[in-house]
Image: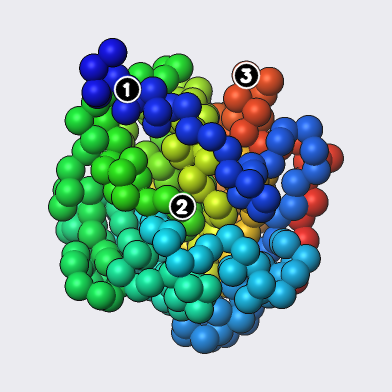
């Protein structure tokens, strides 16, 4: 076995983390918290939504949760979604609120990496790219490149971002609540298409089973501590580009340790809005996101897509 094969096997065979980091096991009940606000969307107001959601999700004070999940020595990747520019990307106010809480938990600013596929996408969404120094880091995979070994797993064969593979010890997934013109919805699981070099290969059949297969990779499944879905402004048609005529101010964050349950909940929110607006269901439109159901099946066991096993709490 050469060094590259050894590293690949080490990546694929990484051990589960302890305590709160252990992923939800399919078949047990999952909790999704929808933290809803009104009016202001500045960082302070978003921080209130975030703290409230964390406390209900974990049943503990927000400060204690952050200190349990993160601390000195962690390099935390904040995986944002910036493809659609300022209108429909992960909002800087949410990223700022998360970063402040990580720093309060003891994570150094220079060990927090705001990242996506490309620097240009980050800048288009309003972020200031930065690499180096003792401040928050913000850069795309194009800045550092892809891990050189092709990783083949189930239906997926891709190069993966060095940021995910080599730099981050933990990841917070920060997707956006929006429609997708091919895969039905683009929420938590699909956000990791931004970590591979060839996502164009995996949109056939509305992303099923590719999105589910991708998320079973241990370095995604085990490094991702938490998913916080940005639903402050949501889009129910025309995605992934920003189409303001099909957006609405949902004004909420969705939080869960179970990305499948979160994606299922987000899917239902989008379906409800489509029905309100007289649009066909995603099934009728030929792009039902069945990859969410696949992710919950006995082969994948990434979480729950059975509504009887999902507790949705609006606060």
Residue 180 sits in which quadrant? Answer: top left
Q: Position of residue 49 (x, y in %)?
A: 62, 76
Which tag, 3 or 1, sits closer to the chain's start? 1
Q: Residues within 10 Å of mark 2 (few under 14, many from 20)?
A: many
Which residue is the extreme one toward the right? 308
Which tag, 1 or 2, sits closer to the chain's start? 1
- Residue designated by label 1: 6
Q: Secondary structure at mark 3?
A: loop
Q: Residues within 10 Å of mark 3 (few under 14, many from 20)?
A: few
> Label 1 to label 2, Cα distance in Å?
22 Å
Q: Position of residue 3 (x, y in %)?
A: 24, 23
Identify the residue shown where x is 35% and y is 45%: 164
Q: Secondary structure at mark 2?
A: strand
In this view of the protein, which residue sits in the foreground, 305 or 100? 100
Identify the residue shown where x is 62% and y is 64%: 68
Q: Nearer the viewer, mark 2 or mark 3?
A: 2
- Residue designated by label 2: 170
> Label 2 to label 3, Cα distance in Å?
25 Å
Q: Is residue 108 in view? A: yes
Q: Position of residue 51 (x, y in %)?
A: 63, 75
Identify the residue shown where x is 58% and y is 38%: 16
Identify the residue shown where x is 45% and y is 67%: 72
Q: Residues within 10 Å of mark 1 (few under 14, many from 20)?
A: few
């Amino acid at each position: 076995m050469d060094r590259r094969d050894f590293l690949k096997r080490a990546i694929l065979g990484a051990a589960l983390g302890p305590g709160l980091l252990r992923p939800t096991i399919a078949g047990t009940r999952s909790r999704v918290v929808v933290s809803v606000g009104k009016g202001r969307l500045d960082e302070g107001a978003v921080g209130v939504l975030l703290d409230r959601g964390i406390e209900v999700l974990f049943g503990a004070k927000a400060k204690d949760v952050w200190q349990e999940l993160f601390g000195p020595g962690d390099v935390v990747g904040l995986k944002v979604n910036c493809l659609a520019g300022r209108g429909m990307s992960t909002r800087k106010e949410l990223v700022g609120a998360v970063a402040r809480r990580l720093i309060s938990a003891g994570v150094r600013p220079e060990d927090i990496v705001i990242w996506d596929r490309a620097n240009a996408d980050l800048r288009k969404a309003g972020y200031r790219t930065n690499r180096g120094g003792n401040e928050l880091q913000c850069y795309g995979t194009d800045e550092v490149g892809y891990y050189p070994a092709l990783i083949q797993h189930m239906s997926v064969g891709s190069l993966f971002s060095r940021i995910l593979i080599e730099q981050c010890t933990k990841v917070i997934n920060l997707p956006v609540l929006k429609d997708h013109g091919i895969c039905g919805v683009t929420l938590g699981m699909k956000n990791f298409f931004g970590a591979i070099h060839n996502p164009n290969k995996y949109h056939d059949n509305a992303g099923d089973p590719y999105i589910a297969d991708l998320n079973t990779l241990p370095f995604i499944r085990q490094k991702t501590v938490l998913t916080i879905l940005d639903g402050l402004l949501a889009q129910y048609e025309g995605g992934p580009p920003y189409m303001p005529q099909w957006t609405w101010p949902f004004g909420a964050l969705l939080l869960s340790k179970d990305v499948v349950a979160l994606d299922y909940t987000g899917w239902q929110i989008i379906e409800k809005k489509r029905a309100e607006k007289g649009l066909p269901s995603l099934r009728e439109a030929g792009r039902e996101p069945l990859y969410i159901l696949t992710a919950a099946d006995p082969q994948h066991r990434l979480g729950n897509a059975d509504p009887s096993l999902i507790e949705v709490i609006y606060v």
